[in-house]
C-alpha cells in the first residue's frame, strides 16, 4: 500500500499521520481531502509532505482510502467516492454505527472493506486499534494492512459487532482518566515532586495497577484490599454509577 488517502482532515487523520511519521512509515503519496480549507491548512502546516485537496475523486483513487468522517457524513461521503474507488483498493472506515455489511451494500459489493476505531494514544504509537475485515477481504491485502498498522500500537482483529464496544472502552477511555491523572500530577507537584518525577511516578503506578488487577491472579476483592487506606472510598459507588449511566448511554447511541 504505497498510496494512502484520508477522506476528512480532522483530528483522527492528524493522529494517524503523526503515528506513521513516528514509526518512519513512508508512502509514495499521501492525500488528504476535506471540504474545509482551514482543515487542510492545518494538516499541511503539520505535515508538509502530504498533498491536500478539495477533490474527493483525487483522494478516492489511492490504494488505501481511510474514511475519517463523522457518522452523519458517511452516507453523503460514500456517494461521493464510490465511483472513484479502484476495485483492488482497500477502504478503511473509522466511523461507528456503519457496519461492514452496511458499507458493502452502500458500495455495491466492494470487496476490501475494513473498520477500525483508533484510540488517541496512537499519536505516541501506543494505541488500541481494533480492526474488523469483510469476509471477501483479499488475504494478501489483509496481511499487508496488519503489517502497516502494527507499529501504531495494539491491533486486535475483532468481530465487526464489537467495534462500538471498543469505541466506548478504548477510543473514549482516555477521557475518563485524563483529567484525573492531570489532577494527580498537579497534586504531586504541590506535595514537592517535580514535573518529570510526578509524571514518571504516575505512569509506573498505572502500569503496576493494571498488572496487579488483571494479571496477579488475585480476585478483585483481594486486589482492593492490598492498600488499607482508601481516600476516595466514600465516593466510589457514586463514580461507578456515573460509569453505568454515561457509558451505557453513549454505547446505546452509537451501536448499529
Image (spheres, helix red, strand yellow):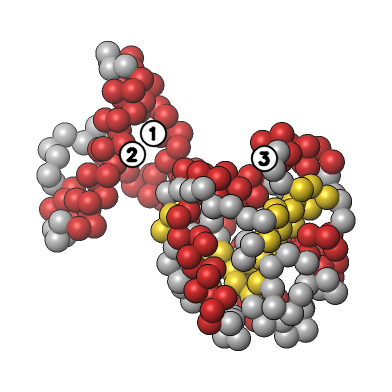
Is residue 95 at least partly visible in the picture?
Answer: no
User: Which callout, 1 or 3, points at the residue further toward the start of the chain?
Assistant: 3
Q: Quadrant of the N terminus?
A: bottom right
Residue 15 locus on image (x, y percent): 58, 46
Which residue does the image show at 39% across and 44% down from the upper left? 239
In this rendering, position of residue 65 left or right of residue 249: right
| Residue 25 image position (x, y, % from top left) | 54, 52
Q: Nearer the viewer, mark 1 or mark 3?
A: 3
Q: Would you name the residue on which mark 2 appears? A: 235
- Element type at mark 1: helix
Label 2 crowd (10 A; few <14 / some 14-19 / many >=20) = few
Between 33 and 244, the one nearer to me in the picture: 33
Local secondary structure at mark 2: helix
| Alpha carbon distance from label 3 to label 2 | 45 Å
Residue 68, above or below 15: below
* Mark identifier at residue 47: 3
Q: Earlier in the sequence, mark 1 or mark 2?
A: 1
Residue 154 appears in the rendering: yes
User: Mark 1 highlights which residue?
Assistant: 181
Q: Please tell me which residue is depicted at 38% across the width and 44% down the height of the picture.
A: 238
Q: Is residue 148 above or below residue 204?
A: below
Picture mark count: 3
Q: Is residue 136 left or right of residue 125?
A: right
Amino acid at each position: 500500500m504505497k498510496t494512502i488517502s484520508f477522506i476528512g482532515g480532522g483530528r483522527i487523520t492528524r493522529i494517524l499521520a503523526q503515528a506513521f511519521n513516528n514509526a518512519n512509515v513512508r508512502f509514495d503519496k499521501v492525500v488528504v481531502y476535506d471540504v474545509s480549507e482551514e482543515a487542510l491548512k492545518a494538516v499541511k502546516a503539520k505535515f508538509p509532505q502530504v498533498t491536500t485537496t478539495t477533490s474527493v475523486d483525487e483522494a478516492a483513487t489511492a490504494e488505501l482510502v481511510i474514511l475519517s468522517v463523522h457518522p452523519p457524513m458517511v452516507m453523503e461521503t460514500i456517494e461521493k467516492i464510490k465511483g472513484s474507488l479502484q476495485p483492488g483498493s482497500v477502504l478503511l472506515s473509522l466511523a461507528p454505527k456503519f457496519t461492514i455489511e452496511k458499507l458493502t451494500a452502500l458500495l455495491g459489493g466492494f470487496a476490501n472493506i475494513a473498520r477500525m476505531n483508533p484510540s488517541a494514544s496512537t499519536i505516541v504509537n501506543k494505541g488500541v486499534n481494533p480492526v474488523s475485515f469483510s469476509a471477501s477481504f483479499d488475504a494478501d491485502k489483509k496481511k499487508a494492512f496488519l503489517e502497516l498498522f502494527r507499529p501504531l500500537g495494539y491491533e486486535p482483529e475483532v468481530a465487526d459487532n464489537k467495534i462500538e464496544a471498543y469505541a466506548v472502552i478504548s477510543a473514549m477511555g482516555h477521557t475518563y482518566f485524563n483529567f484525573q491523572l492531570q489532577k494527580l500530577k498537579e497534586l504531586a507537584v504541590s506535595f514537592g515532586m517535580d514535573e518529570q518525577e510526578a509524571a514518571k511516578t504516575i505512569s509506573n503506578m498505572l502500569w503496576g495497577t493494571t498488572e496487579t488487577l488483571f494479571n496477579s491472579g488475585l480476585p478483585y476483592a483481594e486486589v482492593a484490599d492490598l492498600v488499607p487506606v482508601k481516600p476516595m472510598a466514600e465516593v466510589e459507588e457514586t463514580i461507578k454509577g456515573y460509569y453505568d449511566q454515561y457509558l451505557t448511554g453513549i454505547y446505546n447511541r452509537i451501536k448499529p
